[in-house]
Each structure stands twice: as C-alpha cells, then as structure tokens.
Image: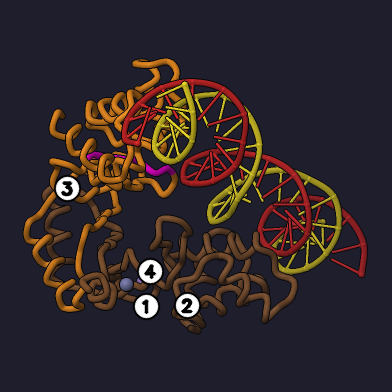
Chain colours: A orange, B brown, C red, D yellow
Amino acid sequence: MADAISVFRAFLKKKGLKLTRQREIILKAFIGTEKHVTTDDLYEIVKKKKQSIGHATVFRTLKLMCESDLATSLNLDGKVTRFEHKYGHEQHYHLVCTKCGKFIEAVDPEIERLQQALAKRFSFKVTSHKLRILGLCKECSRKKRR
Amino acid sequence: MADAISVFRAFLKKKGLKLTRQREIILKAFIGTEKHVTTDDLYEIVKKKKQSIGHATVFRTLKLMCESDLATSLNLDGKVTRFEHKYGHEQHYHLVCTKCGKFIEAVDPEIERLQQALAKRFSFKVTSHKLRILGLCKECSRKKRR
DNA sequence: GTTATAATTGAAATTGAATTTCAATATCAA
DNA sequence: TTGATATTGAAATTCAATTTCAATTATAAC
Ligand SMILES: [Mn+2]
Ligand SMILES: [Mn+2]
Ligand SMILES: [Zn+2]
Ligand SMILES: [Zn+2]
C-alpha cells in the first residue's frame, strides 16, 4: 500500500505531475479493494470518502495508474472496461462463464513460459498479455445438462 | 465458401430466419476477405457490390455470423470491435504491437493443451478463448533501442 | 390468387461508456 | 507577489454499438 503510493508518486514526479489529495484518495480506494472495478464502481467508493470528487478525475487517475503499471484494464463481458491491480500481483487469466458472468482467476507458469517462447520465435518483445477463457463454470454446465 | 453458406443457411433455418439477398451478399463479402474487419470495413466492401445495404443490416448479419460460429469478434486496439473468420479456421492468438499496431497470428498446440488442462482443474467447460499478447514487434523494438 | 402473418430492411434516432472541454481553483518556483 | 503550470469537476462531446420504426418483402394459409 505505502509501496504503491511511492510508486505512483515517483511516476507522477517523472511526468511533472503532482500527487494531489484527490489522486491519493482515488489511489487508496483502488488499492483498498480487490474487486475488478469500473470507473463508476470506483467513483462510488471514492464518493463515500470525499463528497466532491468527479467522474473525470477518477477516470483520469485510473488512466495514470495504468500508465504507471499500478493497474491494468480488462474486459470481462465485452461491454464495460474494468480495472484491477497490477503492481504486486501476478499476471493471470480469467475463466469467464458466459452464462452467469462469474469468473475464476488462474495462473500457470508453463503457459507463461510457452507464451514467451512463442513470442521469441517472432522476435516479439512481450510486455503483457490478456488471456480470457470463455465457457461454462462448473455450476452452469451442470444446470445445462439437466 | 459454399460450405460456409450452408452452415449459415442451416443456422438461420433453425432460428426461423431467412437467407436473404442482403445476408448472402454480406456473408460472401466477409468470407471473401481474410482481413480483420470492423462493421464499417465490411459495410464499405458490401456497398461496392450492392449500393443499397445499410449499416444496420451489416451489423445484424455480423452478429448472426458470430452466433452461428462462422465469425468471431476480437479487439486488437482497445477501441473498435473487429471480426474474423472462425469456421474452418484454427483458433489463434494475436501478438499485437502497441507501437505500430501491427499484429501477428500464432498457434501453439501445447498452449492449447495446457489451457484445457487448466480449465479442467476448475471443472470449467471451455468454448473458446481470447489471447492477446501485447508488446513490441521486431521492427519497433529495434527502433526503440537506437 | 388473395390474404394473413411474420421476418426483413435501412435510415435515422438513441444509447451509453469513454473522453474532452472549459472556467475556476490550486500549486509552486522565481 | 507574480507568473506559469497543473488540477479539478460539471457538463458537453464523441463515437461505436444498438435500437426504433415505418415500409417492404417473403412465406404460409386459405
Ligand atoms: Mn483478475
Ligand atoms: Mn486473427
Ligand atoms: Zn456460470
Ligand atoms: Zn511495431
């Protein structure tokens, strides 16, 4: 947490930007949840802390957090963009149920390794990846069978 | 091609829909390109064949093609939705250059296998996946070093 | 063939998330 | 202080995605 703040502070400094009160509130609110939030989700959380923060500031701060690799954006449903932690979190995949919307997070070092090897074959320098596996969760595939 | 048309026809029939002249033109235009098209891209292609086709029909037909698994949607740039062939094409990944936008398509049977194994651990029934590897292409990573 | 029924179409309107504008305010260095 | 620059939030704008709707067309029933 304190760590994330200093990362953000360093990033902002390098860009000639300031860690304002609003940005700090937004960052802390984001760090404080493990959810995959939309800008609106985060806006709602933040408003409880401080009445007078605007959507625009939340949006812009989320963008800055992505640039600084504290956060990353993802899309689970093909509609809204969501944000999740990146700093201090392992890159992972999302197994998304197309029926109920629930999702599972997973990692696999072997898949990671093979992705790197694949990229190498194309002299492609990987910075990140987004893997979404679509299908039916345990519960939904059981229901469907009946 | 003829094959894809019969798949589409069968799908439509099952849903009580008709293979109209417009739908056939749109389908053929889509089959006829190997590009990753936006609805507008396809609309432009189709307009050359038949002056009087509307955006809405292209959009709706593309949706039907996805439902029938002839096509699949993807997002390369985080902005527009694109469509590519699915029927008769292997599921593949996109290595997208964040600098120049170019992308490479790739497959890896081993990665596929591991994804299935991963899903199985969660009793998750996979229908498809979307893997996008982000980074710098050969050319762009060379330029950057200089 | 005539008529009823349902599907289709395309122009235009609408939606809604994402993004920008702008005038007011805050911050900071000289 | 003073000037330059960054920040903010309400509101406006953008733009792809989607829907509406009245006109048209295809299909089925008589
Ligand atoms: Mn996650
Ligand atoms: Mn492709
Ligand atoms: Zn489910
Ligand atoms: Zn490139």
Horizontal side of residue B50 vs C26, given as left or right:
right
Q: Which residue is mark 1?
A: B88
Mark 1 vs 3, N-terminal side: 1
Dot 3: element: loop
Dot 1: element: loop
Mark 4 vs 2, N-terminal side: 2
Badge 1 crowding class, 10 Å Cα cut-off, few under 14, some 14 to 19, many 20 or more, is: few
- Could you give the CA–CA distance between mark 2 and mark 3, rounded to whole angstroms? 32 Å
Which residue lies at the image location 27% right of the left edge and 62% below the top edge?
B134
Subunit bearing disc 3: B
Q: Which residue is mark 4?
A: B101
Subunit bearing disc 2: B
Which residue lies at the image location 59% right of the left edge and 60% below the top edge?
B60
Q: Which residue is mark 3?
A: B123
Q: Which residues are magenta?
A: A80-85
Q: Amino acid at mark 1?
A: Gly
Dot 2: element: helix
Q: Are marks 4 and 2 in contact (CB under 8 Å)?
A: no
Q: Are marks 3 and 4 in contact (CB under 8 Å)?
A: no
Q: Amino acid at mark 2?
A: Ala
Q: Which residue is mark 2?
A: B4
Q: Please check the rendered image and state whether residue B53 is part of the magenta-colored stretch, yes or no.
A: no
